[in-house]
Image: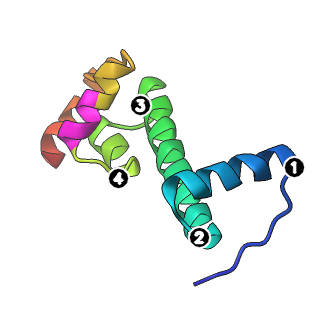
Amino acid sequence: MGTISTRVPDELEGELEEYLEEERLDRSTAVRKLLSEGLEEWRREQALKRLAADEISFTKAAQLAEMSVWEFAQLAKEHDITWVSGDHLEDDLEDL
């Protein structure tokens, strides 16, 4: 496991302390959890963005987001993204 060290503004450190108390976590566990959740959200945003730009197929977007196609379909619906594209429909059908 790698180590990451960083400096944070005082206000962010204060919020982290509140989070530690509320979640009853030690600092390392809390930072790992927050980093993991942030990267998960980033992957989903990237997948939605690339799908909306018609850069990747729906199935590839679900894989990029590390979600099942059914979960990703719900996420795309929540973000009002149309994912049926003639350009990628054949790829999606093959992947399913």
Instruction: Look at 33% across and 37% down and name the residue there.
Output: 57
Mark 4 lies on residue = 66
Mark 2 lies on residue = 26
Horizontal and vertical percent position of residue 33: 52, 60
Q: CA distance from mark 4 to mark 1?
A: 32 Å
From the image, state whether disc 4 or disc 3 is nearer to you. 4
Instruction: Look at 47% across and 50% down and name the residue there.
Output: 40
Q: CA distance from mark 4 to mark 3?
A: 14 Å
Q: Nearer the viewer, residue 2 or 51?
A: 2
Instruction: Give yes or no for contact between labels 4 and 3 (Cβ–Cβ under 8 Å).
Output: no
Q: Residues within 10 Å of mark 3 (few under 14, many from 20)?
A: many
Label 4 sits on a secondary structure element that is loop
Q: CA distance from mark 3 to mark 1?
A: 35 Å
Q: Residues within 10 Å of mark 4 (few under 14, many from 20)?
A: some
Mark 1 lies on residue = 9
Report the amino acid beneath label 4. Answer: Glu
Magenta region: which residues?
A: 69-74
Looking at the image, is mark 4 or mark 1 earlier in the sequence?
A: 1
